[in-house]
Image (cartoon, grey):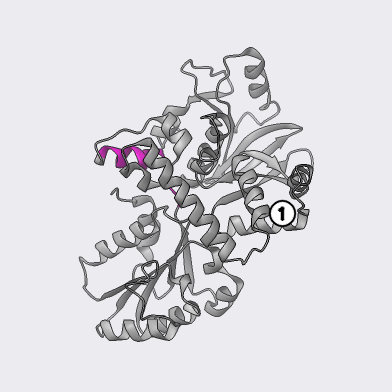
């Protein structure tokens, strides 16, 4: 398995801190791997650590309460600073109390979970700022390529555009096996992390709304527009319910809501946003007859890559002409437009004119799947393959 240095470099400075280290992200994105790699680094210094995986309820069957966690750790640890790793700890009621108690007992605590319940207001209040959090995401293309090489296989850009970056799928040689794995993972996420956790009664309606949202990635939406669409198709659901369900999906790290900023109004447009899937496979497994949505998936993976690279990302409304991303980092702005191809003159004109009026000192980039260089004096054209394989191009 590959070394996820990007995340480890962010966490490493807190290894010995008494702050609780919270590692979150969607299921099967590699949180447990990061935890294992942290343990591997610390094992070079000490053997005083305790690991509990609450996804494995056979191994942890005797641990039912937060007090059980504390007693177990105390029975296994040594007297000096102990490193405690609790994987998927949200499965235990009162886990926050366990973290708080262990922290007071000279423990450096690391926890993982697949739900933002880990960052709930109650937990924040209880810890009073005594934590740091890190979100792990599915593999970006460079990571997936490296893992594919380790497995003596290949992963093309098109494969990534369709089937995304959940690491384990690469361990299955046949596409049918990968699709089965991704479909089962999707079902686990929908049932365990949403329906069961939030005790959703209208399960049929909920599934249809979730399906619509995940297959409509990289598009502008409002809760009302989704509600109108559903009601038009015989599914009774109110805008308030849609917004609540969207919040559930975001809380489980399944989607990101990205705000739109209007240059004309000089403010965020609150009534509509864009939604990006945490992984484009959640779109593709819902497509029929191999009619995959490469155009919107391409925009989605570029969003995921920009966030991975540390950019703050918004959608920019340039006086009615949408620029897909305003990416900001280190006080520098980069305007990024995404198009699958600009071979057609009409498409080329539309995409490049979106930059009209943007200050000359701000970087302007268009990313396409074309091999021809369409750069102009003011707009830089980057091929998708170059963007994905060279982290320094943006």
| Residue 80 rendering spot, x and y as whole percentages | 26, 82
Location of residue 291 (image quadrant): top right
| Residue 9 rendering spot, x and y as whole percentages | 36, 55
Above-or-below relation of 265 to 381 = below
Most prominent secondary structure in the magenta stretch?
A: helix
Location of residue 171 (image quadrant): top left
Determine the residue positioned at 24% across, 83% down. Answer: 78
Determine the residue positioned at 35% across, 33% down. Answer: 155
Name the residue nearer the viewer: 150 or 62: 62
In the current view of this chain or complex, which residue is farthest to the top? 345
Is residue 367 toward the left or the right of residue 315 in the image?
left
Q: Residues in magenta?
A: 137-149
Callout 1 crowding tier (Cα within 10 Å): few <14, some 14–19, many ≥20: many
| Residue 375 rendering spot, x and y as whole percentages | 53, 19
Above-or-below relation of 297 to 211 = above
Q: Which residue is mark 1?
A: 242
| Residue 351 rendering spot, x and y as whole percentages | 64, 24
Name the residue nearer the viewer: 93 or 201: 201
Judge whether residue 142 is colored magenta: yes
Q: Is residue 388 visible?
A: yes
Is residue 4 toward the left or the right of residue 129 in the image?
left
Name the residue nearer the viewer: 34 or 281: 281
Judge whether residue 199 is colored magenta: no
Name the residue nearer the viewer: 200 or 12: 200
């Amino acid at each position: 398995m590959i070394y996820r240095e990007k995340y480890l470099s962010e966490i490493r400075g807190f290894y010995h801190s008494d702050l609780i280290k919270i590692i979150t992200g969607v299921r099967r994105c590699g949180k447990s791997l990061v935890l294992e790699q942290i343990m591997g680094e610390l094992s070079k210094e000490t053997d005083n650590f305790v690991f509990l995986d609450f996804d494995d309820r056979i191994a942890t069957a005797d641990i039912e309460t937060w007090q059980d966690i504390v007693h177990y750790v105390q029975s296994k640890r040594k007297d000096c600073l102990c490193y405690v790793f609790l994987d998927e700890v949200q499965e235990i009621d009162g886990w926050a109390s366990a973290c708080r108690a262990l922290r007071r007992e000279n423990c450096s605590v690391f926890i993982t979970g697949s739900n933002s319940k880990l960052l709930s207001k109650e937990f924040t209040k209880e810890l009073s700022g005594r934590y740091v959090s890190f979100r792990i995401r599915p593999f970006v293309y460079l990571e997936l390529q490296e893992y594919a090489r380790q497995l003596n296989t290949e992963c093309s850009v098109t494969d990534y555009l369709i089937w995304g970056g959940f690491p384990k799928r690469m361990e299955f040689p046949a596409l049918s096996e990968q699709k089965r794995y991704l479909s089962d993972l999707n079902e686990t996420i929908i049932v365990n992390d949403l329906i069961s956790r939030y005790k959703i009664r209208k399960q049929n309606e909920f599934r249809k709304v979730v399906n619509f949202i995940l297959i409509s990635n990289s598009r502008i939406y409002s809760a009302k527009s989704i509600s109108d669409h559903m009601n038009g198709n015989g599914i009774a659901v109110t805008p308030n319910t849609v917004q609540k369900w969207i919040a559930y999906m975001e809380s489980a790290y399944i989607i990101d809501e990205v705000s739109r900023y209007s240059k004309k109004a000089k403010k965020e447009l609150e009534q509509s946003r864009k939604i990006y899937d945490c992984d484009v496979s959640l779109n593709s497994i819902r497509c029929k007859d191999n009619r995959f949505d490469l155009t919107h998936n391409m925009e989605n993976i570029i969003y995921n890559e920009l966030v991975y690279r540390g950019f703050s990302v918004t959608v920019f409304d340039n006086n009615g002409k949408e620029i897909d991303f305003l990416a900001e980092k280190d006080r520098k702005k980069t305007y990024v437009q995404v198009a699958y191809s600009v071979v057609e003159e009409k498409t080329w004109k539309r995409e490049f004119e979106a930059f009209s009026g943007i200050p000359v000192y701000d970087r302007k980039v268009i990313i396409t799947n074309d091999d021809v260089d369409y750069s102009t004096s003011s707009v830089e054209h980057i091929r998708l393959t170059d963007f994905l394989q060279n982290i320094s191009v943006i």
